Amino acid sequence: MNLFPTALIVLGLALTVSFASREEFYQVIDSHLHLGQELGPDVETTFKSGRLWIVRLRENSPLHLTGSFRRLRGGEKSYRFLDRLRGTFGRRAPLIRTTLAGIQRARIQNDVELLSAFETRRAGTAGNRSAIALVAERLRSLGFELSLSCYAPEVCNVIAERRGLAEPSAVTVVMAHLDSVGETHAGADDNASGVAALLEIGRVMADVPLRKTLRLVVTNGEEDGLLGSVFYAKELERQETLGAIGLLVNMDMIGYNQNGILELETSAEREGLARWMAQLVHQYTSLTAKVSIGAWGSDHVPFLRRGVPAVLTIQNWDTKNPCYHEACDTPEKLNYSYITEVARLNTAAVLTKDLE
Ligand SMILES: [Zn+2]
């Protein structure tokens, strides 16, 4: 029981960065460069913390023309919430707390192992199709209404939905990509971790009465250039239903961590959403939130670009998995308590949003 009647959020602005003269600064948005590929003499790092990496490019460098760098638009920054939130729990707190108590670490671990046992889950392979079928069947058995959104023959996103009871036209989305990199391994952290958390969220939500529609989206082809999420975002755009999404949380690489820091990444326009999520991190989990403004490199991006309030939950990038995109991205290296905490966070986010 918390004795403090009013919410008191102390923002520890441990790290804040913004630039007055923006013209010459760029954000690195290429995962190969984040993997440690050499930058070359034209590039000077001016700031690097977590997911946010800012560089200065030499004038007239041909690198300006590559897709690896994005000119800063001014909102980019990175900061950590240092203090725990003290506050009252919302009127739905008992329901949130009981639902969170149902989340089982052992089930998450089991699913990570199951999904990592494929030879690969790369889009277009037999392993990918089997994994998609497995996930679809699981969500169907939980009572979700299933549909597929396929951007190529037999390369599909899985869409699982439970209609809201009071406000069915308002939608909350939980998202994770199922495909993996390479032909010889099926990434445990990237991204069996996100899919396993999504399945567990689906399981504990299966019997919770929800006012709004809950949609679980398992995307495909993320590693090939966000193919599935771009396709799906365009599909909703055509149907003019993107505006129905009041919250989209994406889980990508939530399995490798020792420092307890979770990054919440979004665009400058959605900083308020990241702060709201940070409060939930401290209210409902043992993790520390780190906000990163400047979204890149995962399935939240095509939705943010189209005006959807979206946020990525991802491991602290300063201490990211050394096996990122490598065959050694295997289940025994993961921190299952961390994945469980992220699943708790995103369950709390869905339930809190549901009452707004
Ligand atoms: Zn990924």
Image (cartoon, rainbow, N blue to C red):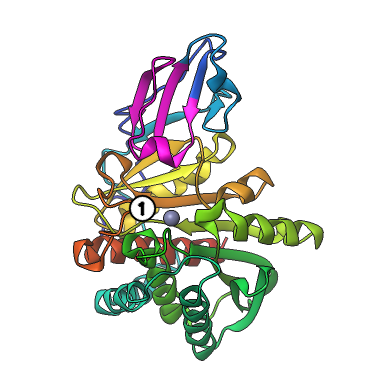
Q: How crowded is mark 1: few (under 14 residues within 10 Å), some or many (20 or more)?
A: many
Q: Is residue 303 magenta?
A: no
- For image coordinates 55% across by 65% down, the residue present is 220
Does the segment drawn in magenta span residue 34? yes
The residue pinned by badge 1 equals 325
Question: Residue 155's quadrant in the figure?
Answer: bottom right
* Residue found 25% across the figure and 59% down from its top: 328
Up-down: is 243 above or below 106? above
In the image, residue 265 above or below residue 19: below
85 left or right, relative to 274: left
Q: What element carries label 1?
A: loop
Task: Please name the amino acid that badge 1 sits on.
Answer: His
- Name the spot of residue 296 as percent of width and height, x first: 51, 41
Residue stretch in magenta: 27-56
Q: Quadrant of ligand 1?
A: bottom left
| Viewer can see residue 355 | no
Front residue of 329 and 341 = 329
